[in-house]
Amino acid sequence: MTEPGTDFDSLEQAWVARPRDTTRGSTSPTSPVAQGRESPLGIEIRVRGCVQGVGFRPAVWKLARELGVTGEVLNDGQGVLIRAGGEPAVLASFLARLRRERPPLARIEGFETRTYSGALSGEFRIVASEGGAVRTQIAPDAAICDACAADMADPFGRRYRYPFTTCTHCGPRLSIMTGVPYDRAATTLAGFPLCLPCAAEYGDPADRRFHAETTACHACGPSAHLVRYDGRAVSFEQFSLLDGVDAVPGLLARGEIVAIKGLGGYHLACDATRADAVAKLRAAKQRDRKPLALMARSIDVIRRYCNPDAAETAILASPEAPIVVLAASGPESLPADIAPGLHTLGFMLPATPLHRLILRTFDRPVVMTSGNLSDDPQAIDDADAARRLAGIASYALVHDRPIANRVDDSVVRFSDGAIRVLRRARGYAPAPIKLPPGFERAPEMLAYGGDLEAAFCVLTHGDAILSQHQGDLENVATLDDFRRNLALYAAMFKHEPSALAIDRHPDFHSGRLAREHAATADLPVIEVQHHHAHVAACLVDNGRPLAAPPVLGVVLDGLGLGDDGTLWGGEFLLADYRHARRLATFKPVAMLGGERASREPWRNLYAHLVAELGWPAFTASFSELAIHGQLAGKQRPLLDAMLASHVGVPPASSCGRLLDAVAAALGICFEHQAYEGEAAARLEAAVDPRALDEGDELAYPFAIPRLLGSGLPYIEPLPMWSAAFGDLSIGTSVGVIAARFHRGLARAVAQMAGKLARGSGGAPAFDTVALSGGCFQNRVLFEQCARRLRTAGFTVLAHAQVPTNDGGIALGQAAIAAAQLLEPTEGVARRSPSARLTAVEPLLGGE
C-alpha cells in the first residue's frame, strides 16, 4: 500500500509550490479541477522518537480535525504512524504544523514520509496500536505543566489541591515504571483504578489526559499524609490547617526538619534562612560541607539571593526543572552553612504538584537535599525511610504511590554560553542521545561506565541511552541499585547487547559486574581507556561524525588508568572514536599515601613541593608562610621515606591533584576534602573576578619541557609555584593568586595545544580541541581554556547534554566499542585512523 516518497522538506515544498491547473482534465463543473482545486492525496508519516505516552496522538488528532484532514494515527513498535489524506496545500500545512506544534514532552528524531494509496475517508481517528519490535523511547519524569498547575489551583475543579495532578504533558515516567510496555498496569499506579470521571478523560481524544497513564484525582488516586517519626499520632488541631500537606510550611517555619517523599526519592527539608535548622540538618545527616540543594516557590524568591539570566531562568522553569547552580549575587544572603566556602547556590523550582502545594504560601527558600545519610542512596521505600531518616527528621510527608526507580535531581550550570549538565537524572534520563552520522549500523552495546558518578549506557538502533546518575559504586546499596537498573533498562528497551564495554581499570566494581555478565551470556568485553572515553563522550555530545578527522582531546580530571599502567589525569590525546594517542601530559607527581592523597590536599602540596622546589629550598625562601609551619608539623621523615622508597606513592599526571595542592597552599582546603572536588570548587570560588582582567604578564607561568625517556611534552608547574609563593610572601590576596593560577594554567593548555598542532612544521595535525574531564566543571578554568583556544584559532568542543565528569564516560565507552566493531566493515575513503594518528609521530621525539 505504500511506496517510498521524498524527504519531509522537499515533499512539503513540492506541494506548497505545486501550480493549480484549471484548463486540463475533467470539465465537470463539480470536479476539483474545474473548481480550481487539486485532487486529494494520501501520505503516510512515520514519526520516531519519544512520542508515546506524551500526548502525541491526541495532538495529531486535534490538528487533523482542525484542518479537515482524513485518516488515522496509531502507536506501534517503532513510534507513531500517521496516515493522512487531503488536498496538497492542507497536507503541507498539516506537516509543517506537526513539526512546530508537538507536545511539550515529545522528542522527535525526524519524520519519514511516503505516498499512500489506501482508502482514507471519514473523520480522522485514533486507532488501536499495532505490534512489532519495540523501538520507541521512554520519556523522563517531567515537571508539572501550567495546565495542571491551574487545575490544582481551581477551587471549583475536581483536582483542587490534589498533590498528584498530571496529564500527558507532565508528571512521573521513569520513577514509576515497573515494566514494559508503558501503560498503567506497568506503573506504580496499577493499584489505583480510575474513577468514572477520570476514565472518561482517559478515553477522550480531545482531553489532554487521553491515555495519560498517571492520571488520577482525589477520588481514585494516591494520597499524601503527615506522620511523626516518634510514633505519636499527628493532631491537626495543633496546626488548624487543611491537611498534612498544608501543615508542612508551618513545621518548616518553626525550625523542624521534614522528610518529604517526592518523585524519585525522599528529600530532607528545612527552612534555608534558619542557620540553626541548617546546622542541625548537616549534623544529623553527617554532611560536613557539601553544598545543599535549595527549592523556592518562584523565580522572584530566587532573585532575592541570585540573579539568574534569561537562559538560567528558562531552564529553571523547563519540564526538566533541574537544580541550577547560580552565582549568589542577590540583594539578600543565606546562612554560610548552605554552601560553605562557595559563592554559588543550587536552586530549583517545585517540579511536582506536591512541592508546589508545600511552598504555595512559603515565601522563603527551603533546603531540599537528598533523603539519606552522608553518601548513601536516597531513600525511596517508606519503611526504609522511617528507619534511616527518623534520626534526622521529626516529621515525614509520605504518600501511597510507590517509587519504582530511584531518580535523583539533575544539576546544571550555565558556562561558556550554554547550559551544561553536571548530573544527569530527573528530567533528562532516559531521553536518548542520537548517535552521530556513521553509527547507523552500530551494534547493540552496553557500556558500564566507571565507579564514581556511576551511569551505564545502552546503545540501540542508533540511539545512546544514558542511565540516570547512580552515585558511587563503592557503596553497597548503590551497587545493588546499579544492578537492578541494568535489568530494568534491558527490559524497557528489550535490549540484548552483542558486546560489553568497560573501563580498563581492573578493580572497578562496574568492570567486575560486566565480566560476570559476559561470562553468563558469553559476550565479548571491550576495555576502553578512561580518558579516551572522556574524549569520545564529548564528540558524541557534539554530534561529530564517525568519519571526522581526529581532534586534540584535553582531558583534565582526577585519576584514570593510562595505557602504560600508570595513573593519568592531565592528558592531551589525539583521538577519534577508534583510536587515541597520548601526545602530552601534566607532570607526574607522587600521590602520597595513594588514595589518601585524593582526600587530603596537603599530601599533594607536600609532594609537589618536594618534586619542584625541594623542602630545603622551600624552607630557605618561604619559611615565614603559614603553610610551611603546617607542613613542618606533619610526619615529614615518614613521608620522605615513602617518597625515597617509591612505596605507596604512585605517580599521577593529575590536574585534579594539582588543583588540590594549590588549594592547600592558599589555605582554602588544607587538611581534608569533605566531598569529592571540594578543594577545586573552593579554589574556583576564591578567584577575584577583577584579577581575571589583568594582563597576561601577571598570569603564573608554566614551562613545557619533555619527559625523560618518552620525550612527551608536559606541563611543568615549577615556575607557577615560585610565582605563587612569591605573591603569598608579599601579602597578595588569595583571590588574586587564585585568578593568576587559573589564567596561567589555561594559557599553558592553549600553548600546549598550539605546540602540538604545529607538529614538525607541516600541516596542522588537528584544528579542533575537545575539552572533557571533571576539572572542567570549574567554570573559570573551562571558560579561560575555551576562550584562549578559540583565540588561537581552534574550534572548541565541550559537553552540554552529557556530564563532563565520569557521569558521561559510559557514553564514550559505548561509542568507542561500537566504532571498533564497525571498523572491519566500514569502507571510509580517507586515511585510516592509525595513519592519521601516526602523522604526529615527530611530536613524540626531541625538538
Image (cartoon, helix red, strand yellow):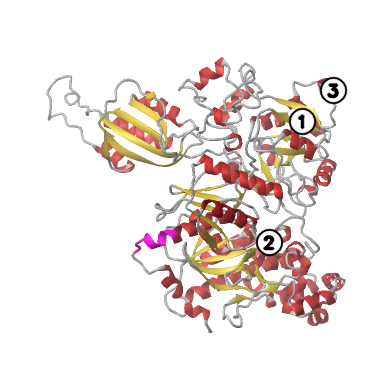
Mark 1 surroundings within 10 Å by alpha-carbon count, few (fewer than 14), some (14 through 19), many (20 or more): many
Amino acid at pointer 2: Arg
User: What span is colored magenta in the figure?
Assistant: 821-828
Q: In this rendering, which labeled residue sits more in front, label 3 or label 1?
A: 3
- What residue did someone put label 3 on? 238
- Whether 151 is drawn above or below 669: the answer is above
Helix or strand or loop: what does disc 1 sit on?
helix
Q: Position of residue 254 (x, y in %)?
A: 84, 33
| Residue 603 inside the magenta-drawn segment | no
Given residues 690 and 544, the one toward you in this image is 544
| First along the sequence among labels 3 and 1 | 3
Mark 2 surroundings within 10 Å by alpha-carbon count, few (fewer than 14), some (14 through 19), many (20 or more): few
- Quarter placement of the N terminus: top left
Q: Position of residue 134 (x, y in %)?
A: 45, 39
- What residue did someone put label 1 on? 249
- 654 displayed left or right of 239: left
Identify the image quadrant of residue 83.
top left
| Residue 823 inside the magenta-drawn segment | yes
Helix or strand or loop: what does disc 3 sit on?
helix
